[in-house]
Amino acid sequence: MTVAIDRATGKRRGDRTPRPGLGRRLKDGYQKHWYAYAMIAPVAVVIGVLVLYPLGYGLYLTLTDANSLNSARTIGVNEIEATYKFVGLDNYADILWGPTAYDRFWSHFIWTIVWTAVCVGLHFFIGLGLALLLNQKLRGRTFYRLILVLPWAVPTFVTVFGWRFMLADQGIINSALDWLHLPTPAWLEDTFWQRFSAIMVNTWCGVPFMMVSLLGGLQS
């Protein structure tokens, strides 16, 4: 077998250079990109102070019996020290398996899953259908696109207040249903209709963005 030798280095051709250790790679990376690290360091410090520290402290408090009565507080010129104790995972066990676990946690957890699945599904499928329609050569396609994007262009708080007025007991929706001799739900009072209304308004606000995103993908 013939082995080729590099005359300049004296090494055999085809030999793999050994990979440097982790410390050497970190040192080389720092020397090469130190300016980038210096630029992001202030942001990292701010995030650590404003986000990571409060998050870590909040997680620690979940492992104690802290409440508004035994936490450190200042009343006038008097400073009251904290008296809460470390209880481990007792709080988590109570909220997951305690006697009121369903009302305090599981009912809200299930509703969050339903909310996410229904809203995302409606956003995607309605947005996809509208995007496919607008991707066709339709007369007045620009006008339709403008009308369908308007709910997204309007600020969310304006949309929410508008729907709140329309869903009121004497609002335009119940007035129209009453004129048609149909039942008038208590949109803002009954739990089921509150959730139905929330999904409806969220879909109204979210479908235009999904439609524009999918339409851009279809036309790219």
Image (spheres, rainbow, N blue to C red):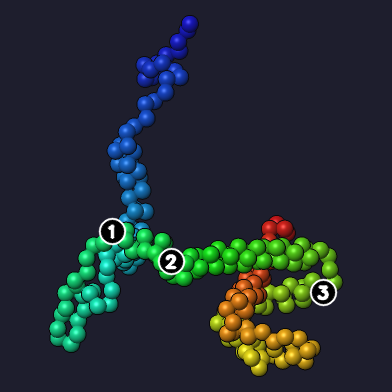
Q: Is residue 138 visible?
A: yes
- Which residue carries the number 3 mark? 140
Q: How far is the residue under mark 2 from the one under mark 1?
A: 18 Å
Labels 2 and 3 touching (C-beta < 8 A): no
Which residue is the site of mark 1? 88
Could you tell me the amino acid type at mark 1?
A: Gly
Mark 1–mark 3 Cα distance, whole angstroms, equals 64 Å
The residue under label 2 is 101
Q: Label 3 is placed on what type of residue?
A: Gly
Q: Is 138 on the left or on the right of 28, as rendered?
A: right
Looking at the rendering, which quadrant does residue 204 occupy? bottom right
Question: Residue 21's spot in the image, x, y percent?
Answer: 32, 33
Q: Nearer the viewer, residue 78 or 68?
A: 68
Q: Residues within 10 Å of mark 3 (few under 14, many from 20)?
A: few
Identify the element where label 1 is drawn: loop
* Most distant residue in the right direction: 139
Q: Nearer the viewer, residue 165 or 139?
A: 165
Q: Residue at x 37, y 54 (%)?
A: 36
The quadrant in which residue 181 appears is bottom right
| Rendering coords of residue 60 (x, y %) | 28, 62
Of the numbered discs 2 and 1, the one sitting upstream in the chain is 1
Which mark is in front, 2 or 3? 2
Looking at the rendered structure, the secondary structure element under dot 2 is: helix
Residue farthest front in this picture: 99
Does 176 appear above or below 26? Answer: below
What secondary structure is marked by label 3? loop
Of mark 1 and mark 3, the one earlier in the sequence is 1
Q: Amino acid at mark 2?
A: Ala
